[in-house]
Image: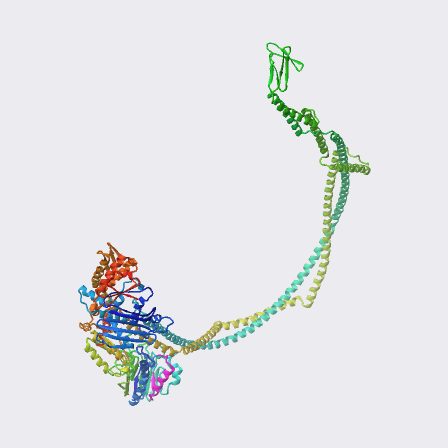
């Protein structure tokens, strides 16, 4: 196929464009980005594939927005000897025109659908696989296109491989048809497709439906079986019921006879019960009479015993009463003794208290007197004159004295000294009019603090004047001495010693005052003095009052100790008297109780005797009355008579019993009851079964038997059909799959033979770009799997984007070089080699130029610099 | 001694469906099975029969719609002679029985007599039917023998009407419901009975028509085991001797076509054979082909069967017994210009198709498909 001319109107961004391509060689179409280079390829595809009526997105999107204009594409191309101009207009006034320029139909023009079909037919004769495979579109990535389906390439490769295979193009289309057949039953990955699965599902569903219908039908059969069984059971129950009823009638008859005898026996039993009643009553009456006689005898015995008890009781009472009176007298005497002891005890305690009061009064008076003495001394001490000298004053005085002495010493020490030593013997000196003797061992010395004048009498008068600086020291000594004197004067003392003595006197006075105060506090011992005085006065009054009150019978004890002894003796006497009183009280109470008990018993015995007398009288009266009514012998006679009557009727009963035994009454009656139960049970069972039968019949009727049967029959028919259909589908599917697999396996083997020439072509071209070491590894599907460069094999997937791009372009160029020019299609490179360096670009351009010698190469680019090396190329600017 | 003439038929199994019949074929099959009763009536009247006995399995099951029962009884009414119906294993008495249903009781015409009690039924002056109806679905004894009890050779002409498989025909020797031959022979020998009209076997028996114990077979074919069309037996009892004549009344046929096909000429012969079969709409055909065919012959066969399937009531292969190998002959693909690796694929598939491999049939099918796809079948 060769593309000669392409014209676009209103296709995407292109308003109007027409490009003519040279029949051979390289053409570089340049234009800035977005100018619509790729749109040209899409437009060509649309021209071939889409009828003018198409509303596909490619067309709808191609139309410029907001403009009501037709989309138009026109191409002039050759396939084999046929050259045509093919024009198509979409959307507005859809038009298709195919004009034959050369070939068998040269000069013929067809339009409309006929034109579309004719173009499609023509196009189908071109190697469209190759046309798709030899494009390199930046947008579609770096994939290697499937080359094995290209018949032209295969022919070329076969020819190079030295093989002469058949018409592979035919085979390729056959494979497509086989694939299409497979697609009827299998998915693209050759798993069961929807139609196949549907057939299986239909079959399964038909099986399920048939099974369900069969189950429902079995349900009906089940009910029928149940009914049949029930009917048999009903027949059986009916038979058993009739037999039971017959047996019951027989038993009823036997039972009637038995019941007659039983009635007679019951009558006899009633009479026996009456006779027994009479006998019981006669016996009871006789018993009661015997009891009356016995009761009278007992009463008489009790009366006699009571009389004896009464007289004994009266005899016992006198000593008890006497004892009680004596005990009462002793109790009174003891009470009197207690009163007396209590009075003595009280008196002794009052005496003791009195003596205590006297003692306390004496002590209070003594304390109060001592307090007076202490108070007088304190007054005297506090009246003595005070001194203001204290420790601080003493310290001040000491300090002033020491300061004066130090100043004086400093005055002397700082001054020159005059020392005279008598040599050999003592000599006299005269000073200030006075003579002093100086001994040889003791020189005379004075400091020169003032003008010193010494006269050795008769010989020398020596005057020594002090040095100039002595004035300062003298003033200091003078001031210190004056300050000391002033301080003494202020405190009214002559010297420090005097001041110290005054201070010691003041200390002594203070000690004495404290001593006196301590004496006072010791005497008071925490007491308040005024309260002490009150206490003394109160005690004095109490002592006086007790003296007036006390009787003079008994002498007052000598002392408090004696009083205490008296009190203790009185207390002991009182305790003893009280103990004695308690003892006599208890004895008296016991005696009183004994007396009361004896008296009570006597009264009780007297009451009982009276009662017994009355009872005795009544018993006698009852017996008398009873004997008057029925004499004792009549009662005995009645008992005998009733016993005889009872024996007679018992005999009669025994005879009936023997009769019933003979009739096997017990068994007959029990059997009759059992058989009656059996009959009732069977009747119930029968009714129940008949009820169930009716209900089952109703159920059977309501089961829609004909419908169920019809559904079952139809389901079976459907199942049969579904199975047959599935079997057919399976068979056809397996056949198609086997055929496809076999064909593909053989194609794979065939393709393996094409690999070598293809590899050689790629390597030859590649070595021009990469150098002599370039090698590739090609798969059976003509894909470059690995590339060797500089001794290293790299898988295609691991190559850089630039290297991949170069390689896929090389593969396309090699392919173009391989195929027969008659079969060839244009190589289309769109926006390629953006990732390659200038050196590689140059070499690739050379490879492109080589390919261009054999086929059309169309390069679309926005970077014409990349392809500057293509000197022979025709350049078209858009 | 009296004489009588009647038709013996059985196993009408009205309401039966055949699952290999699709659509209208099934409807016609069902309708025709009822319609044949009318022809039986016509035959009976034509042959001067006194009555018709149906020896069991009058109905296929008890689940017929009132409409279907009504149509069947209407056809029986059209017989215009007494029609004695014996309950068989498909339509026994008992609860749920088709004979207990309102449809039957209300719609049965006067000439239809249900033999629902065991023993003799007067059929004509001096003629008795000795009925042995199935009283339940699963009897536990010979279904016929009890009916023979107490029958004396008193000059009454007796026809036993029973249902079940004779012990000499029953493959199941332990079956409880086998009809014992000995009591029948004994009763026949002492002239207590004179003919035994049996049902259950769908094929007439014995084929030579001799003796007094007979199966009439079904009136319309029900399976591929039954050769030919359904028949009824005309029985003439005269001086206690039975003369039995078979009459074909059925219109449907189950036909199994077993052929060896080894070349296009065999396919052509088959074509001619199928063309001769008639009436196709009432023939249920099952094919059993064996042999080896080339692709073109196989394609021709496929076309033939596809055409005929539309004409016959049913046409299906009996897959289990079909063993037809398809192998292309050497020139078939050459003529079709199959080259390249496809030619190699053909060689491989051909080898496989002719082998005993499991996928040999699939290989044959694959070749046929290939043949069709390259345009072989259309040339």
Point 39% across, 81% down: residue:
B100
Q: Is residue B144 left or right of residue A259?
A: left
Q: Quadrant of the C terminus of chain A?
A: bottom left
- Whether residue A433 is visible, yes or no, is yes
Front in this rendered view, residue B335 or A330: B335
The answer to which image quadrant residue B260 occupies is bottom left
Question: Which quarter of the figure has residue A213?
Answer: bottom left
**Residue A528, placed above or below residue A839:** above
Query: The N terminus of chain A lies in which quarter of the figure?
Result: bottom left
Residue B80 position by quadrant: bottom left
> In the rendered view, would you say A378 is above or below B280?
above
Residue in front for this viewpoint, A244 or B130: B130
Is residue A781 visible from the viewing direction of this image?
Answer: no
Q: Is residue B63 magenta?
A: yes
Q: Point out residue A55 in the picture as x, y percentages from the top left corner.
A: 34, 73
> Which x, y percent locates residue A142?
29, 62
Vertical side of A422 occupied by A275: above or below: below
Name the residue rendered at 30%, 59% in the picture.
Answer: A835
Would residue A816 be found to the left or right of residue A310 on screen? left
Which range of residues does the magenta coloring cover?
B61-85
Q: Position of residue B128 (x, y in %)?
A: 33, 86
Looking at this rendering, what residue extends furthest in the front direction? A468
Q: Does the magenta-highlighted stretch encompass residue A49?
A: no
Picture colour scheme: rainbow
Given residues B66 and A411, the one toward you in this image is: A411
Give residue A433's position: percent from left, percent from top. 67, 14
């Amino acid at each position: 196929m060769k593309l000669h001319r392409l014209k676009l109107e209103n296709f995407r961004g292109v308003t109007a464009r027409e490009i003519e391509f040279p029949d051979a060689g390289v053409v570089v179409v340049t234009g800035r980005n977005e100018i619509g280079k790729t749109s040209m390829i899409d437009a060509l595809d649309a021209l071939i594939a889409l009828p003018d009526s198409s509303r596909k997105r490619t067309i709808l999107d191609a139309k410029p927005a907001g403009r009501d204009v037709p989309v138009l594409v026109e191409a002039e191309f050759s396939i084999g000897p046929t050259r045509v101009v093919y024009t198509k207009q979409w959307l507005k006034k859809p038009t298709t025109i195919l004009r034959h320029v050369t070939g068998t139909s040269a000069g013929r023009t067809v339009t409309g659908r006929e034109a579309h079909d004719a173009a499609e037919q023509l196009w189908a004769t071109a190697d469209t696989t190759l046309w798709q495979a030899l494009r390199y579109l930046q947008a579609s990535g770096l994939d290697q296109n499937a080359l094995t389906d290209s018949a032209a390439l295969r022919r070329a490769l076969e020819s190079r491989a030295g093989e002469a295979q058949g018409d592979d193009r035919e085979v390729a289309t056959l494979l497509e048809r086989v694939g299409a057949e497979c697609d009827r039953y299998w998915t693209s990955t050759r798993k069961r497709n929807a139609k196949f699965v549907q057939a299986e599902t239909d079959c399964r569903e038909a099986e399920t439906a048939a099974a369900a219908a069969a189950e429902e039908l079995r349900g009906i059969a089940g009910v029928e079986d149940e009914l049949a069984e029930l009917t048999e059971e009903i027949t059986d129950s009916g038979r058993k019921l009739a037999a039971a009823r017959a047996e019951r009638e027989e038993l009823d008859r036997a039972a009637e006879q038995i019941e007659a005898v039983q009635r007679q026996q019951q009558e006899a039993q009633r009479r026996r019960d009456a006779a027994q009643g009479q006998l019981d009553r006669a016996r009871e009456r006789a018993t009661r009479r015997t009891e009356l006689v016995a009761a009278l005898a007992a009463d008489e015995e009790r009366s006699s015993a009571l009389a004896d008890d009464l007289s004994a009781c009266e005899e016992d009472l006198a000593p008890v009463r006497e004892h009680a009176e004596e005990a009462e007298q002793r109790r009174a005497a003891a009470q009197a003794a207690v009163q007396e002891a209590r009075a003595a005890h009280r008196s002794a305690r009052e005496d003791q208290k009195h003596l205590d009061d006297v003692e306390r009064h004496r002590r209070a008076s003594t304390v109060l007197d001592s307090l007076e003495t202490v108070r007088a001394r304190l007054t005297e001490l506090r009246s003595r004159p005070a001194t203001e000298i204290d420790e601080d004053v003493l310290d001040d005085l000491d300090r002033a004295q020491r300061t004066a002495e130090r100043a004086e010493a400093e005055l002397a020490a700082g001054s020159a000294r005059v020392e005279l030593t008598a040599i050999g013997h003592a000599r006299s000196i005269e000073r200030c009019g006075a003579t002093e003797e100086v001994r040889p061992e003791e020189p005379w010395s004075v400091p020169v603090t003032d003008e010193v004048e010494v006269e050795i009498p008769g010989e020398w008068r020596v005057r020594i004047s002090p040095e100039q600086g002595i004035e300062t020291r003298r003033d200091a000594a003078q001031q210190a001495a004056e300050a000391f004197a002033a301080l003494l004067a202020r405190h009214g003392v002559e010297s420090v010693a005097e001041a110290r003595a005054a201070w010691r006197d003041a200390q002594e006075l203070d000690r004495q005052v404290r001593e006196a105060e301590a004496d006072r506090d010791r005497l008071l011992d925490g007491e308040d003095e005024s309260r002490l005085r009150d206490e003394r006065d109160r005690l004095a009054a109490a002592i006086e009052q007790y003296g007036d009150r006390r009787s003079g019978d008994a002498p007052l004890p000598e002392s408090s100790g004696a009083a205490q002894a008296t009190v203790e003796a009185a207390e002991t006497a009182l305790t003893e008297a009280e103990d004695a009183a308690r003892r006599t009280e208890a004895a008296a109470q016991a005696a009183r109780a004994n007396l009361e008990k004896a008296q009570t018993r006597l009264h009780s015995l007297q009451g009982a005797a009276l009662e017994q007398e009355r009872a005795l009288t009544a018993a006698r009266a009852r017996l008398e009355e009873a004997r008057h009514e029925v004499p004792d012998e009549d009662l005995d006679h009645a008992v005998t008579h009733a016993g005889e009557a009872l024996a007679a009727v018992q005999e009669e009963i025994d005879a009936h019993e023997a009769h019933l035994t003979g009739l096997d009454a017990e068994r007959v009656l029990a059997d009759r009851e059992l058989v009656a139960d059996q009959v009732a049970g069977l009747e119930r069972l029968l009714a129940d079964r008949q009820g169930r039968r009716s209900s089952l019949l109703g159920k059977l009727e309501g089961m829609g038997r004909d419908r169920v049967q019809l559904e079952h029959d139809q389901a079976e028919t459907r199942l049969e059909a579904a199975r047959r259909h599935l079997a057919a589908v399976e068979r056809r599917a397996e056949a198609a799959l086997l055929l496809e697999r076999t064909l593909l396996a053989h194609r794979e083997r065939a393709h393996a033979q094409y690999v070598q020439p293809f590899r050689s072509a790629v390597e030859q071209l590649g070595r021009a770009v990469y150098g002599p070491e370039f090698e590739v590894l090609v798969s059976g599907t003509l894909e470059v799997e690995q590339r060797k460069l500089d001794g290293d094999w790299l898988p295609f997937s691991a190559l850089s984007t630039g290297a991949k791009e170069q390689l896929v372009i090389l593969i396309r160029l090699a392919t173009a070089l391989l195929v027969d020019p008659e079969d060839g299609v244009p190589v289309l490179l769109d926006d390629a080699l953006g990732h390659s360096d200038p050196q590689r670009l140059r070499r690739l351009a050379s490879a492109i130029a080589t390919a261009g010698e054999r086929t059309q190469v169309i390069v679309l680019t926005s970077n014409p610099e990349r392809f500057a090396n293509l000197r022979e190329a025709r350049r078209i600017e858009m | 001694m009296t004489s009588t003439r009647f038709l013996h038929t059985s196993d009408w199994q009205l309401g039966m469906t055949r699952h290999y019949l699709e659509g209208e074929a099934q409807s016609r099959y069902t309708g025709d099975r009822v319609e044949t009763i009318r022809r039986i009536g016509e035959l009976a009247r034509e042959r001067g029969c006194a009555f018709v006995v149906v020896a069991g399995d009058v109905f296929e099951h008890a689940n017929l719609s009132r409409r279907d029962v009504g149509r069947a009884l209407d056809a029986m009414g059209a017989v215009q002679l007494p029609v004695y119906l014996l309950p068989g294993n498909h339509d026994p008495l008992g609860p749920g029985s088709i004979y207990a249903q309102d449809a039957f009781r209300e719609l049965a015409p006067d000439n239809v007599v249900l033999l629902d009690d065991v023993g003799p039924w007067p059929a004509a002056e001096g003629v008795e039917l000795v009925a042995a109806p199935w009283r339940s679905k699963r009897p536990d004894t010979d279904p016929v023998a009890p009916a023979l009890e107490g029958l004396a050779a008193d000059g009454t002409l007796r026809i036993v009407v029973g249902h079940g498989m004779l012990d000499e025909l029953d493959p199941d020797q332990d079956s409880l419901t086998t009809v014992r031959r000995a009591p029948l022979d004994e009763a026949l020998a002492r002239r207590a009975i004179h003919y035994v009209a049996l049902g259950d076997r769908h094929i007439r028996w014995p084929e030579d028509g001799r003796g007094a114990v007979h199966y009439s077979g079904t009136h319309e074919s029900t399976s591929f085991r039954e050769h030919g069309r359904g028949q009824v037996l005309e029985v003439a009892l005269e001086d206690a001797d039975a003369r039995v004549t078979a009459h074909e009344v059925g219109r449907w046929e189950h036909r199994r076509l077993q052929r060896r096909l080894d070349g296009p000429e065999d396919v052509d012969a088959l074509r001619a054979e199928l063309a001769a079969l008639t009436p196709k709409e009432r023939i249920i055909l099952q094919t059993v082909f064996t042999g080896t065919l080339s692709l073109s012959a196989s394609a021709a066969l496929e076309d033939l069967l596809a055409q005929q399937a539309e004409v016959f009531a049913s046409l299906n292969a009996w897959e289990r017994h079909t063993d037809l190998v398809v192998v292309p002959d050497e020139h078939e693909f050459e003529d079709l210009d199959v080259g390249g690796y496809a030619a190699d694929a053909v060689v491989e598939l051909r080898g496989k198709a002719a082998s005993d491999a499991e996928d040999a049939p699939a290989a044959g099918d694959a070749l046929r498909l290939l043949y069709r796809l390259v345009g072989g079948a259309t040339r």
